[in-house]
Image: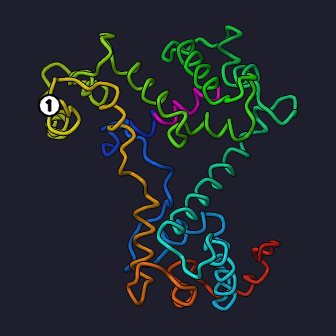
Amino acid sequence: MTRRLLVCLALCVASGGSKALEKKSRVHEDEPLSRMEHDDHKNHDYDHEAFLGPDQAKAFDQLAPEESRRRLGIIVDKMDSNADGFVSEEELKDWMKRAQSKYMYEIMEHQWKDFDVNHDDVISWEEYKNVTYGSYLEGTQTDSVYNHSHMMLRDEKRFKVADTNGDLTADKHEFVAFLHPEEHEHMKDLTVQETMEDLDKNRDGFIDMEEYIGDMHSLKEGEEEPQWVKEERKQFSEVRDKNKDGKMDREETREWILPSDSDQTVTEAKHLLQETDANQDQKLTKVEILNKYDVFVGSQVTDFGEALLEHDEF
């Protein structure tokens, strides 16, 4: 069974086991800054992961307060990219985007060795195809539920768009773009195209209301339409279909699945600024940040904390 099929089956099991997941969403959100609940009344775990990335946040949580402050001070100096003595909202946002990108690359590294079969530090389309669709290509895959041929053609098209130098191999930057197209500007048109191909059943180049609803919910004969479906119909008419012609074109589809206001780093940067900016001048000094070190990095004093994060940058 292919790697892709296993993923599909896992998603089907997850969605079938929870009514909360009954409503399918095509909206591409950024990779989450944190899996933690964002509730500052309980703790600042969300802020820690958003600011440091999950792995560093776990390590920082084990450090004594004085060590957390010392290492945070080093980070603050790096954040102040224009060396003016302040950290702006934009510098906070840029820092968190780097942490987010670093986490994506770490996930990619775990997958890299599975696909770089000949260990030449690039992944060719042939390598990716054989690893992912090997059983299907050999004719041993009898499961007819999934259209492997369609999936393979889509992956090949995406691979070629991610392959910016056109050599039919992907280095690590190109492979990350292939895995996370919604996060890369040069891949976003393809993401819209893939969505249009999925939903535009009558192939007229648009997504009408029934195609939009049909992607989320299949109404059985005699079944009353759920309230959330009625709300989605209203959303389609009032929000999605901006020019009120009864269908979504490419630009309307793009705004739906890749909303321009979905940047979590902007929201979190504003939140950290609000929590930390003692004199309300819309920028942070190193002192202001260190005074609120628990918001940024936290601490659970432990005996083994000093052994963690012994990296050159600290």
Give the colour scheme shown: rainbow
Residue at position x 60%, y 63% in the image: 54
Name the main secondary structure of what is drawn in magenta. Answer: helix
Residue at position x 45%, y 75% in the image: 272
Residue 100 percent location from the top left of the image: 58, 56
On the rendered structure, is 31 left or right of 64?
left
The N terminus appears in which quarter of the rendering?
top right
Residue on which the image places disc 1: 225
The C terminus appears in which quarter of the rendering?
bottom right
**Within 10 angstroms of label 1, few (less than 14), some, or many (20 or more) residues?**
few
Q: 232 above or below 297?
A: above
Q: Is residue 6 magenta?
A: yes
**Which of the 4 image quadrants contains residue 230?**
top left
Instruction: Check disc 1 and report its element: helix, strand or loop.
Output: loop
Q: 21 above or below 267?
A: above
Residue 216 percent location from the top left of the image: 30, 31
Given residues 273 and 195, the one toward you in this image is 273
Residue 281 percent location from the top left of the image: 40, 83
Residue at position x 40%, y 90% in the image: 279
**Which of the 4 image quadrants contains residue 149?**
top right
Q: 285 above or below 259?
A: below
Amino acid identity at mark 1: Glu
On the rendered structure, is 172 left or right of 226?
right
Which residues are drawn in magenta? 1-11
On the rendered structure, is 136 left or right of 240?
right
